[in-house]
Image: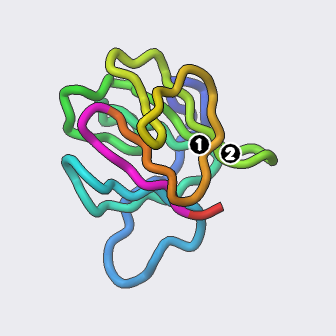
């Protein structure tokens, strides 16, 4: 099965409980669903639509807002033409941008923290 953008559909169910994620993860730090953690595989799409691996109930977030991808050079975030933009550490993402552990991403009023590499 593939997603709307042709990326493989990933099982990005939030992880709860005492067991931490085993690999790179994205944690919602502020906004709806604060505290949820999502493991990142090859790609993780963020948006308001329920077909996203990370679906957030934030009206300032576009249906398909941004995505995080992995390649041998590391993890990258890319805005998908969202209305309100995607930000990394307060700077608007204008083109594909590398992210590192501890970086703070914002889509609408929702803030995420990227962990691991």
114 is within the stretch colored magenta: yes
Do the CB atoms of the residues marked 2 and 1 lie less than 8 Å apart?
yes
Q: Between 1 and 15, which is closer to the camera in this rendering? A: 15
Name above or below for residue 21 compared with residue 34: below
Main SS of residues in magenta: strand
Q: Which mark is residue 43?
A: 1
C-alpha span from label 2 to label 1: 6 Å
Q: Residue at x 32, y 79 (%)?
A: 17
85 is within the stretch colored magenta: no
Going by the image, does 76 lie left or right of 48? right
Q: Which residue is mark 2?
A: 70
Name above or below for residue 68 compared with residue 4: below
Q: Residue at x 56, y 29 (%)?
A: 78
Q: Between 2 and 32, which is closer to the camera in this rendering? A: 32
Name above or below for residue 107 compared with residue 74: above
Instruction: Tell me which numbered mark, 2 or 1, is placed earlier along the sequence.
Output: 1
Can you tell which quarter of the image residue 77 is in?
top right
Going by the image, does 6 lie left or right of 109? right
Going by the image, does 87 lie left or right of 60? right
Which quadrant is home to the C terminus?
A: bottom right
Looking at the rendering, the stretch of residues picked out in magenta corresponds to 108-115
């Amino acid at each position: 099965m593939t997603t709307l953008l042709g990326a493989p559909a990933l099982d990005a169910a939030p992880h709860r409980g005492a067991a931490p994620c085993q690999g790179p993860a994205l944690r919602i730090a502020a906004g709806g669903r604060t505290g949820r953690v999502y493991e990142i595989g090859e790609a993780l799409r963020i948006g308001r639509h329920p077909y996203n691996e990370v679906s957030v109930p934030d009206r300032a977030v576009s249906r398909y807002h941004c995505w995080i991808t992995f390649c041998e050079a590391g993890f990258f975030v890319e805005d998908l033409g969202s209305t309100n933009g995607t930000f990394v550490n307060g700077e608007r993402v204008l083109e594909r941008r590398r992210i590192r552990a501890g970086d703070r991403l914002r889509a609408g009023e929702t803030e995420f923290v990227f962990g691991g590499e």
